[in-house]
Image: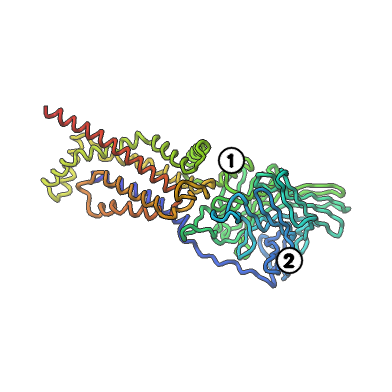
Amino acid sequence: MESQRNFIIIGLAVVSYFLFVAWHQDYGPKQEITPVQEKTTTQIEINEEFPSEVSTYLPPESITKIDELPQEVGVLKTTQPSINLIHVETDVFKVHIDPRGGDIVLGQLKKHLEIQSNPDIPFTILRNSDGRTYTAMSGLVGNGMPESAKPRALYSSTENSYSMSETEDALSVTLRWTNDEGLVINKIFSFNRDSYVIGVRYRIQNTTSKELSATFFGQLKRDQMPNEDTMGGFGISAYLGSAYSTKEQRYERYDFDDMNDNNLKVTTKGGWIAYLQHYFISAWIPDQEKINTISTLTPGGLGIIRVMSPRATVQPGEILEVGGDLYLGPKIQKDLEQIADGLDLTVDYGFLWWIGQPLFWLLNWFNSIIGSWGLAIIMVTITVKSVFYPLSNAQYRSFAKMRTIQPKVTALKERIGDDRQKMSQAMMELYKKEKVNPLGGCLPLLVQMPVFIALYWVLLETVELRHADFYFWIHDLSAKDPYFILPLLMGASMFLMQKMQPTAATMDPMQQKIMQFLPVIMTVFFLFFPAGLVLYWLVNNLLSIAQQLYVTRKIEREFAAKQAASKK
C-alpha cells in the first residue's frame, strides 16, 4: 500500500510540475525589457538598401534607418515624416498604410475585440505608436527601385480613405511611385471579404531605356516587449516570437533569444515567416514556386524577420509583377492550412501535439453540433472519461479492494506496532492472500497525465475559445473565473476524491501532509487558469467520483456476499 501511495504521489507531483511549468510560462512574471528609446533627431544610416524602420507619424519627426548584415556605420541622416496615413476598412480589417514605404503600421481585427466588454475597440495586432512597434513592411530593392531612394520612397494615392461596401466582395488599394527617369511602380493591396489575407503586389512598368533589377522583400518588425493583455494581474501568452518554414522544416520557432544570439539566414523553395502571439499571427507568404531567402536581425533591440524573393530583371518597355501575401489574423487551423504548407502548425500543442490534434478535432466537432464551446468541453471530458473507463475501473476496483481489507490492515498495525519493516512484510503477505494489487491504481493515473497536459495546450491555443460565452457568470472560457467559483469547486471535488481513497497504514506523516495539501496546491494553480480548463477538470473529477462510488459499492457488495458465503 505504501508503494502504491508513493507512486500516486509521484504521479501527482509530475502533473503538478507540468502544470507549474505551463502556468509559469503563460501566467508567471515576465522579464522586464526596457523599450527601445525613440530617436527624434539623428540616426545612423547603414549602407544597404533594406529598411529596418518605418516612418513615424507620432511624434512629428521620423527617422529612416537602412541596415545590412553585417552592419557597418555610415553617415547620419534624417528624413521627413509621412503626414497623411491611408485608411482602409473591410468587413474584417481596419488598416493604416504609411505612404512612406507603403508599410502597414496599424492592423486591427474587427471580428475580435481588444476587451470583451467594449465592442467598439477591435483587437490591434499591428501598431507603431504608444511606445510599441509591430509593423508589416515590404518593398523593392535593386537598381532604381523605391528602396534605393533615400529617404524611402513616398507613394501617392488617389484617396486617403478606402472602404469595402456591403455589396463588394473585394477591395483594391493602389499606391503609385515614379522616379525622375519615368519608372512607374504601382503597389497594390488586395482585400477580399471574410479573408485575413492581404495581397501585396508590385507592378513595375519599365518606361526607361535600360534594364532594371528588382528584388521583393517582406518583413515583420517587432519590439521585444511582452504583450500587454493581462488576466488577473498575470501576463498571459503562449509562445511569443518569430517562426519560419522551409521545405525541409515545415515549422520552426526562432524566438528573441535566438535572434539576439545569431542572425538567421536560410534559403528554401517557398516557405514563410511569421510572428506568433497568443491566439494571433502575422505572416508573410512569398511566391511558393521561387527560391526565397529568410533572415533575421536585431537593430536597436528590435526583432526583424525577413523573406526575400530572388532578383528579377525588367527589360525596357516590359511590365513585371512581383509580391507576396500577408496574413494578419487569428490562428484558425482550417484557414491557415489552406494558405501555406505548415502555417497551421503555428497552432502549437507542444510535444504532445499527436494527442492534442485529435482532442481539438473532437472539441470542434462537438461545438459544430451543440453550438457551445463550454458544452463541447464537457462532451470531450465525457468522451475521454469513457475511453479511459476500463483503466479507471481497474483503478477504482483497486481502491475499493483496499478499503475492504482496511480492518485487517488496522489489526496488523495494532499487533505489530511501529516496526515499519515488519509491517510492510505483513501487508505484502496480506495483499497476496487477498489477491489485491497495491499498484493497481497507479497505471491509470500515469496514462491519463499526457491527455490532461495535451488538453491544456488545446484550450490555451484555441482562439475560438477567446471571449466564448458560457452559462451564468462565465462569459469568457479563455479567461480565469472572475469569482473563482469553478476553481474552488474543483478543489472541493479533489478533496472529496482524496477522502474516498483508502489511507495507508504505513504512510509516514510527511506523505500524509503532502496528500492533504495537494487539493489546496492544485486549487491555487487553477485560480488563474482559463475557465475552460477548470471546467474540464471539475467535470472530470465529478465523473470520477460517480464512477468510484459505483465501483466501491459494487466491490463492497461482492465482498459482503463472499464473507457471507464463507460463514455458511
| Circle 2: residue type | Pro
Q: Percent x, y for residue 288?
A: 68, 43
- Residue 276's x, y, as percent? 57, 52
In the picture, the disc for residue 270 is none
**Distance in Å between CA atoms under marks 1 and 2:** 40 Å
Label 2, secondary structure: give it.
loop
Give me the residue at 18% from left, 35% from top. Answer: 433
Q: Nearer the viewer, residue 73 or 93?
A: 93
Q: Is residue 131 left or right of residue 470?
A: right
Q: Quadrant of the N terminus?
A: top left
Reading the chain from its start, which is encountered first: label 1 or label 2? 2
Mark 1 and mark 2 in contact? Answer it, CB < 8 Å: no
Residue 397, image x, y percentages: 27, 36
Q: Which residue is mark 1?
A: 334
Q: Quadrant of the C terminus?
A: top left
Q: Amino acid at mark 1?
A: Lys
Q: Which residue is mark 2?
A: 81
Viewer-side residue, 315 vs 474: 474
